[in-house]
Image: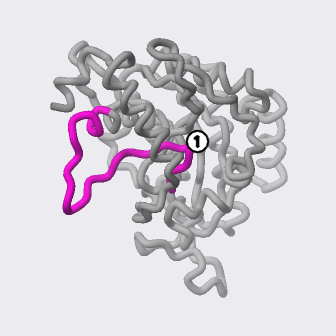
Amino acid sequence: MAKSRLRKICLILLINGLATLPATEEEWIEVAKDFELRWNFPHCLGAIDGKHISIRKPPHSGSFYYNYKKFFSIVLMAVVNANYEFLMVDAGVNGRVSDGGVITHTDFGHMLSNNTLNIPQPAPLPVGPRALHPFTFVGDDAFAMTENLLKPYSPSAACRLDLQQRIFNYRLSRARRIVENAFGILVSRFGILQRSILLSPEKTSTVTLACCYLHNFLRRKVASYITRESVDWEDKEGDVQDGSWRKQNLPIHDLQANTSRNSTNIAKSTRDMYRDFFCSYGAVPWQWNKCS
């Protein structure tokens, strides 16, 4: 398919609101309400993750696109809502940028660091004391933690995680698993992403973005596109059953973990506030057995 035609498809889908980042505080709050309702994580604005999309080595590019997994790639970055839909996609950063720094190369990352996303002001959580909690995104160890981007506690050689920290990690994982499943469905449905794309990085970026936009279109318009069995689901005891995409041995390549522990005190304090909430007023009945 010609590059111009793909870009036209992307534009049509954008015009129809199928891949639109919230622009106002009110729109972000609606996203957060869905995460609270579906995944018991209040004030969550989206799950963030990135994957390497395999490409043929571009001529005269040296190691510019050569990633830590030892193949050539561009990076697909995404923010996903509670309904497995992409709120933001960015494809094209060279695979060599393979740690948490990749987010700084995206428009979303610039807006997040410059406080221009119109993130709602801190507000009390639904239950418990009226302390103000920031609205946050959730990610994994590939990203640097900030006040508005939380990631799990990491154990060290000298210190194991206590029960409350493990509970926080479990609750964050429940919300963050949404973006893992969105990527899994995307790759399982669009076969072109299951092998090296024999196009230039620029054309590969266009193809990848078109797949993401079509994913949103199908998610909203075709009921059978994502079924209960397609994605990870929980039984009555809170045990996670793998979605069908995990059984397909798909080539989904994670970003490299960011080993930096230089989070700000404000970021650490925010994470501790959510930890305390999840272990008290915001607890769910099954978490104690899952984490003890």
The verdict on residue 154 being magenta is yes
Rate crowding at label 1 as few (under 14), some (14 to 19) or many (20 or more) other CA atoms within 10 Å: many
Which of 46 and 16 lies nearest the eye of the viewer? 46
Task: Work out whether residue 188 can be spotted.
Answer: no
Q: Residue at x 65, y 66 (%)?
A: 199
Task: Give the answer, above or below, for where 32 lies relative to 14.
Answer: above
* Residue matched to label 1: 148
Task: Work out whether residue 193 can be spotted.
Answer: yes
How far from the left and from the top, in percent, is residue 133? 55, 29
The verdict on residue 279 being magenta is no
Q: Residue at x 38, y 18 (%)?
A: 282
Magenta residues span: 144-167
Q: Quadrant of residue 206?
A: bottom right
Task: Give the amino acid at mark 1.
Answer: Asn
How far from the left and from the top, in percent, is residue 106? 69, 56
How far from the left and from the top, in percent, is residue 40? 43, 20
Q: Main secondary structure of the magenta part?
A: loop
